[in-house]
Image (tube, rainbow, N blue to C red):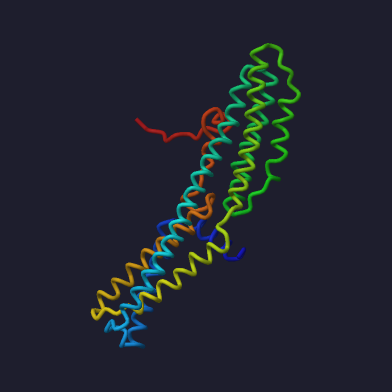
Amino acid sequence: MRRTLSVELWLLNHLSTLVLAFAVVGGVVVLAVAGSVLTSRLKPSLVSGEHNDMVGVVLGMFGAIYGIILAFVIVNLWTQLETTETVVATEATAASQIVRDARVFPDADRARVNAAVADYVHAVVEQQWPLMRAGAGDFARTADRVEAMYQSLRVYEPQTQAEQAFYGQAVDSLDELVAQRRARIAQSNAELPTLLKALVFGGALVILPLTFLYGIRSQGLRLLFVGSVAGLIGFSLLLVVVLDRPFAGDLCVSPMPFKQSALAQFWPVQPGPTTSH
């Protein structure tokens, strides 16, 4: 399973979704059409449709079951992607809130807190994100940065009521950041259970050959029928592959929330295009 998963991640990270769509959907359609042509040549009697009543019942029953499985998997994966985006945004918001709360601290203390937060967001984007894209997210890359943020707040002693209020909020935000960090890393290592993967891909191997047995005398209509079913199944399989890894591919969760709002000050401003007059 790990080897198959590595191939999927490589494809997602090196090929665009459009190229993957042509490869997956087109490949399934071509294989299905070729299988239908081969079946009609080996068993010409199937073309007459004498078994259509039985094949239609079986195809309808299997199609309904397979459709429910596909719908459940795709909705679950889409919800997981949206949840991951929320987790990343919440973690970045917590980091940004720490920076805002530290603005009431004395200069030296504020600089120490900002430096710790800056080190953390850089480690997340530059070190941890590439690992999560490769399906190897871990806690080690940012563990020391988290401790440094706690230490930057731990050594500070607020003097005024305002400082005490914002200090408490900063600590609460840091606790929220740590909780969302754990959730983000867990999401980066999550994948579709093996049983569901077997049902999704195995179901396609059952449904498609059944379409070969449905007899239609017109070869063009028969290939159109088989190709349409294969295209729908191929597109569904593409969605499963793309959505299964929320940090890989074109539809991946972006690290941009860690570069926005109050955290933007920790990233160099990219020079814009110059215009000549």
Q: Quadrant of residue 128?
A: top right
Residue occupying the point 43% across, 65% down: 65
Q: Residue furthest top?
A: 160
The percent coordinates of residue 243 (x first, y second) are 48, 54
User: Is residue 59 positioned above or below 138 on the image?
Assistant: below
Where is residue 71 shown, x and y percent of the image? 43, 57
Q: Quadrant of the N terminus?
A: bottom right
Q: Is residue 24 above or below residue 181?
A: below
Residue at 30%, 71% (x, y): give it: 225
- Report the front residue among 64 and 175: 64
Q: Residue furthest left?
A: 218
Q: Position of residue 92 (x, y in %)?
A: 57, 35
Q: Residue 142 appears at what percent x and percent y?
A: 68, 41
| Residue drawn at 71 percent across, 16 percent down | 158
In this image, 136 relative to 39: left or right? right
**Which residue does the image show at 47% across and 58% down from the upper left?**
240
The one of 131 and 30 positioned closer to us in this rendering: 30
Quarter of the image for the C terminus: give it. Answer: top left
Dividing the picture into quadrants, the one containing residue 164 is top right
Q: Is residue 7 left or right of residue 36?
A: right
